Image (tube, helix red, strand yellow):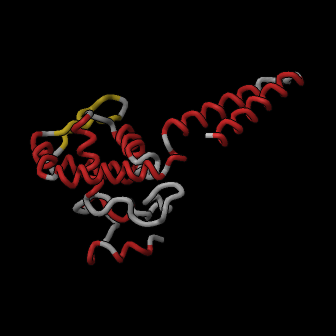
Amino acid sequence: MFGRHHHHHHGRHGGHHSRHPFGFDGREHGGMGGRGFGRGGPRGRFFDHGDLRLVVLKLIADKPSHGYELIKAVETAAGGAYSPSPGVIYPTLTLLEELGYVAATDAGGGKKLYTITDEGQAFLETNAQPVNGLFERMAEAASRSAAFAPQILRARENLKTALRLKLHAGSLSSEQIAAIAKALDDAATQIEAV
């Protein structure tokens, strides 16, 4: 099913990816439906070996976070060009915890809050240059992926929700229908003019 896995690891197998030195490898790079570069992007790797570990560690250093928050933080930093799956993030967090770079505390509801340790901070400082380079690369990807800018995604969802609620609220008068159609047409005209 994941036929490309034998090309990685130089002989290692990806079956227990949580034990891989970087905790994610093949599954991050497209082993789960080609999510490696995210929606609409070119297939292939968004991060090289160990890159996501550095990105996640930097995000935790900036703000102690839950796993789900880190998924959203990476997606936001990349402007939607890449969104790691839980199958990528959680093995990476487990590895960072095993290495002693982060500490996990029970936040209730089955959630863990991850905070950076002194060892993790030292590792991050040692790798400051590649970390900065990774965030610059994500910023570049974000600038190329304006369609996935958080503001546009949020506004689009707001429009879809408002339209759905109005259309399913009951029968609309001809005046209401005309007003909605005009609002949509006006929005389209304004977007085209930007």
Give the answer, above or below, for where 119 lies relative to 46: above
| Viewer-proximal residue among 32 and 140 | 140
Quarter-wise, where is residue 154 in the image?
Answer: top right
- Across and down, in percent, residue 131 comes to 23, 51
> Does 43 sit left or right of 178 as displayed?
left
Residue at 34 percent of width and 66 percent of height: 15
> Does 84 sit left or right of 148 as displayed?
left
| Viewer-proximal residue among 42 and 9 | 42
Q: In which quadrant of the rendered image does the C terminus lie?
A: top right
| Viewer-proximal residue among 39 and 128 | 128
Residue at 44 percent of width and 75 percent of height: 3
Point out the residue furthest to the front here: 193
Residue at 11 percent of width and 51 percent of height: 126
Residue at 19 percent of width and 42 percent of height: 102
Give the answer, above or below, for where 29 lies relative to 84: below
- Across and down, in percent, residue 174 comes to 89, 24
